[in-house]
C-alpha cells in the first residue's frame, strides 16, 4: 500500500488549507451567530472558493474544473471543514453532482456543466429526505409502505412532480436539484423511485421553511415544494425507476467525502486543544504536562489518524475496487463522525470552564460535530446496513 500523495494533490491540499485558515476560519464564528440565514449564507466565501477552483474541483477540465478524484476531494473537504464544517458541506453537496452527471442526457449534461463551472454561486442539492422518510431511504427498510410521498406522473410526454422535501442541504440556495420521486407507488424504492434534474427556475418549484440548526449554521437546509412541476423526459437521470443506481453512486463516493468533513472539524478541535494546552498554566505547569490532559490529546490523535486512514482507503476503493464494498463508506462515516464528536467533547473538557463560552472555539466545534452523528444517514442505520452486509455475505473479506 502506498499512501504517497501526488504533487498535484499536495498542492491542492495546501491551497485549500491556506484558504480555510486565512479566509474561512477568521469569520466563521461570527457568521455562525447571525440569526438571519440570508445574511449568514457565505456567498463571499463561495465566490472565493470558485475563484480558486475548489467549488468546481471534480468537474471536467474542459469546462473549467480539475477532474479531481474522490481522494483529492476528501483531502480538500477535510481542509475546508477545519475552517468551517457548514461551508465545507455546501461545497461537498455541489461536488456530488459530478458523480452522476455521466448518467444525464449528453446535451443537457454539457449545458449544466457550463453553467455550473461559469457561475461562482452555482450550488447543487440532493433532494430525497421527507418528513416521513429519513435514513430508511438508504435501503435498510425496503417495502412499498415507506413514506417517501413525492410523486411523478407522465403526462403528454412530460413528467409532472408533486410533493415536498425537507432538511435538504443547500435547499434554499441551490441552482439545480436532484429530486427523487416515486413513479410507481406499488413498488419498493429499488423498483419504483426515479431521479430528476430540476432547475431552480422551474415553474411549480418553491422553497419553504429554512431550518435553523444547532450546528453547520453556514450550510442552509430547507423544505422544498413541487406543485404540478413539469420537466421533460431528458431530465430523467439514467432512466425511469433507476434512482437506486444513482444513490449507489452517491453513497459510494459521497460517504468518504462526508467522513472527511468530519475529520476536518475533529482536527480543528484537536489543533485548538493542543494550542490551548501549551499555553494554559494550572498547578504550576502547562496543562499539556498533566497526564489527564495528555491522555485525552493522545486519544484525539489516534482517532483522527484511524479515521483518515479508513477514509483514504475507501476513497481509493471507489475508483479501483470491483465490485465496490459499500460497507467501507458506511464504516468510514460512522467512525469519523464519532471521532469528530469525541474530539470536540474532549476539547471542551481541556478548555475547562472556557470550553462552553462563545469566546472560545470549542462550543461551536461541539455543535458542528454533533450534526454528523445523524447527517448523511444515521450511524444506527449505517451500523445495521453494515451488519446485514456481513450477514448476507455481500461485504468483502478482510
Image: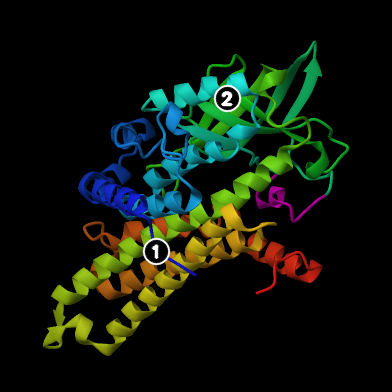
Mark 2 / mark 1, whichever is N-terminal: 1
For the residues labelled 2 and 1, say whether their Cβ atoms are less than 8 Å apart: no
Q: Position of residue 11 (x, y in %)?
A: 30, 50
Q: What residue sits 44% from the left and 38% below the top?
A: 220
Q: Position of residue 85 (x, y in %)?
A: 39, 51
Q: Which residues are magenta?
A: 133-142
For image coordinates 75% across by 37% down, the residue present is 242
Q: Position of residue 14 (x, y in %)?
A: 28, 52
From the viewer's perspective, is residue 390 above or below residue 188? below
Q: Residue at x 33, y 56 (%)?
A: 364
Left-right relation of 320 to 307: right
Q: What numbered label is drawn on residue 109? A: 2
Q: What secondary structure is found at the residue carrying circle 1?
A: loop
Question: Which of these two is toward me, 123 or 377?
Answer: 123
Q: How is the image coloured?
A: rainbow
- Left or right, 277 with respect to 330, comes to left
Our reading of the magenta stretch's main secondary structure is loop
Q: Which residue is mark 1?
A: 4
Q: Quadrant of the C terminus?
A: bottom right
Amino acid at each position: 500500500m502506498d499512501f504517497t500523495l501526488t504533487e498535484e494533490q499536495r498542492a491542492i491540499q495546501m491551497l485549500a488549507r491556506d484558504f480555510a485558515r486565512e479566509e474561512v476560519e477568521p469569520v466563521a464564528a461570527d457568521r455562525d451567530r447571525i440569526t438571519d440565514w440570508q445574511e449568514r449564507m457565505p456567498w463571499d466565501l463561495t465566490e472565493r472558493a470558485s475563484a480558486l477552483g475548489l467549488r468546481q474541483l471534480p468537474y471536467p477540465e474542459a469546462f473549467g474544473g480539475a477532474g479531481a478524484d474522490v481522494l483529492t476531494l476528501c483531502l480538500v473537504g477535510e481542509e475546508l471543514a477545519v475552517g468551517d464544517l457548514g461551508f465545507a458541506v455546501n461545497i461537498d453537496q455541489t461536488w456530488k453532482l459530478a458523480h452522476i452527471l455521466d448518467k444525464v442526457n449528453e446535451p443537457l449534461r454539457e449545458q449544466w456543466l457550463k453553467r455550473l463551472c461559469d457561475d461562482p454561486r452555482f450550488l447543487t442539492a440532493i433532494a430525497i429526505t421527507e418528513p416521513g422518510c429519513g435514513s430508511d431511504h438508504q435501503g435498510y427498510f425496503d417495502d412499498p409502505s415507506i413514506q417517501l410521498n413525492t410523486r411523478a406522473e407522465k403526462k403528454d410526454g412530460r413528467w409532472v412532480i408533486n410533493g415536498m422535501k425537507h432538511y435538504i442541504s443547500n435547499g434554499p440556495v441551490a441552482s439545480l436539484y436532484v429530486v427523487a420521486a416515486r413513479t410507481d407507488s406499488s413498488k419498493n424504492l429499488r423498483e419504483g423511485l426515479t431521479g430528476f434534474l430540476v432547475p431552480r427556475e422551474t415553474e411549480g418549484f418553491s422553497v419553504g421553511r429554512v431550518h435553523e440548526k444547532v450546528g453547520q449554521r453556514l450550510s442552509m437546509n430547507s423544505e422544498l415544494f413541487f406543485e404540478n412541476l413539469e420537466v421533460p423526459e431528458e431530465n430523467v437521470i439514467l432512466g425511469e425507476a433507476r434512482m437506486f443506481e444513482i444513490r449507489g453512486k452517491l453513497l459510494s463516493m459521497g460517504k468518504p467525502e462526508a467522513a472527511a468533513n468530519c475529520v476536518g472539524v475533529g482536527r480543528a478541535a484537536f489543533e485548538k486543544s493542543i494550542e490551548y494546552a501549551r499555553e494554559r498554566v494550572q498547578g504550576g505547569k502547562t496543562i499539556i504536562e498533566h497526564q489527564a490532559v495528555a491522555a485525552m490529546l493522545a486519544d484525539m490523535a489516534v482517532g483522527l489518524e484511524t479515521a483518515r486512514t479508513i477514509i483514504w482507503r475507501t476513497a481509493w476503493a471507489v475508483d479501483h475496487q470491483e465490485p465496490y464494498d459499500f460497507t467501507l463508506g458506511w464504516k468510514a462515516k460512522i467512525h469519523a463522525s464519532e471521532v469528530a464528536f469525541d474530539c470536540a467533547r474532549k476539547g471542551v473538557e481541556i478548555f475547562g470552564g472556557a470550553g462552553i463560552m462563545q469566546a472560545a472555539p470549542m462550543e461551536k466545534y461541539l455543535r458542528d460535530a454533533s450534526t454528523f452523528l445523524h447527517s448523511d444517514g444515521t450511524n444506527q442505520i449505517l451500523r445495521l446496513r453494515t451488519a446485514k452486509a456481513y450477514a448476507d455475505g455481500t461485504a468483502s473479506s478482510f
